[in-house]
């Protein structure tokens, strides 16, 4: 009898067995698919329920925000108006006090705001025959102080007629100061022979006070081997060609520690672009700058009709228009612009900042050469003079006195100080010092050389740029200057010029931008510390009430600026004139690669940051560049101890025209997401968003903040614009 088996010979499965196994496998797969389907359906149902809950919660929070929006805006408006009214009153009282103190000074100095007094002073001084050095320098010092007062009056933006009057008076004083300095030069040179140096046979002298350094050299010896001279006590030197070494020539280097020439420079046409300054002044312009995200570009058409569609929430006082004027039309743009992006900024794709040119075609915003500037003319919107002006001149040596039979005989001329023309056909040519023919066949003359030490009152973050004044065109220019060398260790600049010119040393005003980092944190009630990490120098500004104090670790930082309390405007002027510029201007974005933001929103945020600066710390966030032009992101933390903020204590806040919120993500997140933080709400203003999470002690500090401290912090934030320039 044959035995039946489920396997064939060789261990192979039978057909029946294969069918059975196939059925079991199909049943298992069907069961797994069914289980997966049920799990997916359950997860999808949970996701839908969760999404529905989130949407309902979102709608609930939005409705809640909408219901209290008007109250929050009114409260913020009232607070800003109240502070501004107090500041305006204080400023008015300060001006009146200054006027009274000036009136009671009784020191004989004229009041530059009174036309009759200042005109009398100018006329009498112009006609004064006094030629002694000390009295003239004292009068020049008084005139410089009057100029400072006039510049202060002009800064207060007087009526147009008064402004013209002050500018004319200011220019008259500046011209008269130079005329008196020329008079000193002439009187000293008349006596050059009596003051000649035994060793060199020439006359050299240095006259200086706190405003000027006057170096004079008279060529009495006429040595053809003479090459140059150094005034060692002031580290100024010059080099002359042989043509001048044998002539009746005197050389003057007058270092004026102020710049009266840049004001005379003919203005260049400004390039069209909306400005942050117009917003601060109350303009309602929308920015014409870049769209940071593709989504923002999609809403470009919507903005055209915004004037009729927008619900303008005006929070402007009668005396001063604040930037808290929100437009509901930006709400759609905000939500469209907030697309999640990864840490590399792939969504939205980063684009080069562009501005619209005259022809309507886009062009790069960072264009260091203005179309309106021609050739070598210096763009004063970008470069600024540091350390004052050096007047480098050659004069005819006045006739010297001769002694005859006990009498001193001197030829008197009524021509005054005469400029020695060089190069010129009248320049005497010695047989061994003749000029050379250039390629065109014209006679060329060797240049004159100068070497100066950088003033200790300024800091150059980059190699200084030497420029000369063209009196005919009324411009600073870079031509006619050659062989420039800079010794950074000795802080000394040497160069040649084709002729004698007034010159100055300039620096890019925005060399320290964009900022690498910034932080504003409270130290105590009405006290805060603003730290800015610049591209080339770091600064710390301590704010206490309405006073500020600068600190920096840079080795060449001017000592007269550090650890001194001064007002915010005075600090800004002092830092800028010393070369430590962290402040922006109406043209800054033409020379700095900026993180373009809506200036209206930006200014509004600065106002509200200042209100809570006694209790809340703020800092730079890398996500600020990823959230679009219509939004701002910054780090925020309540801080009452005055100590540095721990890294894990910061929270991220997203700010827009219509809404402020705390984000669920952190600074170290992998991608940007506008998701609302748990247990938080939307608010119509940044201020109420902050107050919603502050402790009772922090809220008390905010309520007790002095209006002058708030104004000072706001000035610094609006001046530096850290949210855009970092």
Image (cartoon, rainbow, N blue to C red):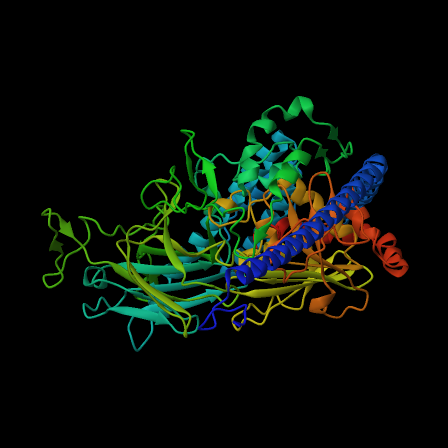
Q: Position of residue 265 (x, y in %)?
A: 44, 42
Relative placement, left or right, of 238 versus 601 is left
Q: Residue drawn at (40%, 68%), measured in percent from left and top?
A: 205
Q: Is any part of residue 474 visible from this angle?
A: yes
Q: Quadrant of residue 72?
A: top right
Please, which residue is most extreme toward the top here? 308
Q: What number of labels is visible?
A: 0
Residue nearer the viewer, 263 or 679 = 679
Q: Position of residue 714 (x, y in %)?
A: 71, 50
Q: Residue drawn at (54%, 48%), measured in percent from left and top?
A: 347
| Position of the C terminus by quadrant | bottom right
Residue nearer the viewer, 8 or 325 = 8
Relative placement, left or right, of 656 versus 192 is right
- Does 575 sit above or below residue 124? below
- Does 352 sit above or below residue 401? above
Residue nearer the viewer, 308 or 259 = 308
Please, which residue is most extreme toward the front here? 1
Q: Position of residue 403 (x, y in %)?
A: 31, 65
Q: Position of residue 374 (x, y in %)?
A: 33, 40
Relative placement, left or right, of 310 versus 493 is right
């Amino acid at each position: 009898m044959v035995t039946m088996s489920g396997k064939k010979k060789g261990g192979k499965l039978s057909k029946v067995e294969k069918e059975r196994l196939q059925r079991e496998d199909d049943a298992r797969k069907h069961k797994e698919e069914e289980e997966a389907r049920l799990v997916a359906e359950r997860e999808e149902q949970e996701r839908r329920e969760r999404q529905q809950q989130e949407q309902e919660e979102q709608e609930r929070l939005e409705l809640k925000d909408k219901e209290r929006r008007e109250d929050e805006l009114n409260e913020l408006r009232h607070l800003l108006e109240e502070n501004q009214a107090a500041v305006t009153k204080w400023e008015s009282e300060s001006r009146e006090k200054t006027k009274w103190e000036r009136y009671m000074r009784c020191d004989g100095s004229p009041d530059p705001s009174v036309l009759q007094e200042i005109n009398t002073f100018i006329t009498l001084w112009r006609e004064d025959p006094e030629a002694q050095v000390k009295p003239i320098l004292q009068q020049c010092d008084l005139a410089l102080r009057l100029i400072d007062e006039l510049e202060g009056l002009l800064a207060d933006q007087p009526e147009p007629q008064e402004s013209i009057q002050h500018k004319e008076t200011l220019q008259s004083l500046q011209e008269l100061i130079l005329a008196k300095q020329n008079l000193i030069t002439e009187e000293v040179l008349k006596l050059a022979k009596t003051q000649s140096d035994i060793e060199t046979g020439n006359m050299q002298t240095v006259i200086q006070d706190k405003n000027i350094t006057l170096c004079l050299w008279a060529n009495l010896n006429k040595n053809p081997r003479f090459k140059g001279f150094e005034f060692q006590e002031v580290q100024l030197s010059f080099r002359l060609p042989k043509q001048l070494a044998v002539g009746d020539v005197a050389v003057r280097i007058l270092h004026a520690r102020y710049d009266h020439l840049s004001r005379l420079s003919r203005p260049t046409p400004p390039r069209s672009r909306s400005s942050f300054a117009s917003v601060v002044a109350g303009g309602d312009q929308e920015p014409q700058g870049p769209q940071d995200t593709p989504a923002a570009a999609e809403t470009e058409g919507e903005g055209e009709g915004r004037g009729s569609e927008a619900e303008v929430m005006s929070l402007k006082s009668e005396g001063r228009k604040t930037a808290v004027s929100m437009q509901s039309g930006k709400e759609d743009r905000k939500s469209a612009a907030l697309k999640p992006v990864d840490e590399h900024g792939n969504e939205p794709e980063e684009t080069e900042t562009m501005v619209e040119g005259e022809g309507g075609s886009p062009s790069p915003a960072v264009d260091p050469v203005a179309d309106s500037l021609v050739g070598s003319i210096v763009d004063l919107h970008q470069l600024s003079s540091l350390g004052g002006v050096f007047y480098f001149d050659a004069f005819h040596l006045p006739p010297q006195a001769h002694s005859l039979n006990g009498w001193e005989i001197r030829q008197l001329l009524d021509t005054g100080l005469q400029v020695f023309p060089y190069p010129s056909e009248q320049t005497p040519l010695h047989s061994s010092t003749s000029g050379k023919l250039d390629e065109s066949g014209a006679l060329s003359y060797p240049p004159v050389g100068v070497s100066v030490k950088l003033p200790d009152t300024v800091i150059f973050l980059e190699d200084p740029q030497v420029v000369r004044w063209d009196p005919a065109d009324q411009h600073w220019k870079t031509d006619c200057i050659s062989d420039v060398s800079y010794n950074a260790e000795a802080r000394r600049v040497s160069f040649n010029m084709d002729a004698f010119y007034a010159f100055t040393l300039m620096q890019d005003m925005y060399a320290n931008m964009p900022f690498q980092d910034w932080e504003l944190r409270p130290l105590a009630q009405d006290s805060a510390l603003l730290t800015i990490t610049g591209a080339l120098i770091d600064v710390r500004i301590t704010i206490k009430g309405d006073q500020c104090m600068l600190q920096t670790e840079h080795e060449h930082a001017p000592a007269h600026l550090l650890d001194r309390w001064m007002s915010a405007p005075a600090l800004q002027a002092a830092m800028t004139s010393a070369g430590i510029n962290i402040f922006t201007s109406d043209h800054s974005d033409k020379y700095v690669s900026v993180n373009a933001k809506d200036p209206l929103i930006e200014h509004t945020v600065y106002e509200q940051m200042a209100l809570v600066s006694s209790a809340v710390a703020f800092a730079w966030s890398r996500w600020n560049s990823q959230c679009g032009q219509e939004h701002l992101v910054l780090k925020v933390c309540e801080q009452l101890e005055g100590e540095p903020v721990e890294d894990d204590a910061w929270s991220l806040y997203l700010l827009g025209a219509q809404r402020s919120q705390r984000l669920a993500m952190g600074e170290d997140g992998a991608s940007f997401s506008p998701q609302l933080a748990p247990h938080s709400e939307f608010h119509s203003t940044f201020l109420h968003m902050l107050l919603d999470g502050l402790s009772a002690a922090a809220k008390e500090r905010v309520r007790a903040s002095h209006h002058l401290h708030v104004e000072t912090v706001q000035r610094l934030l609006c001046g530096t614009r850290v949210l855009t320039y970092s």
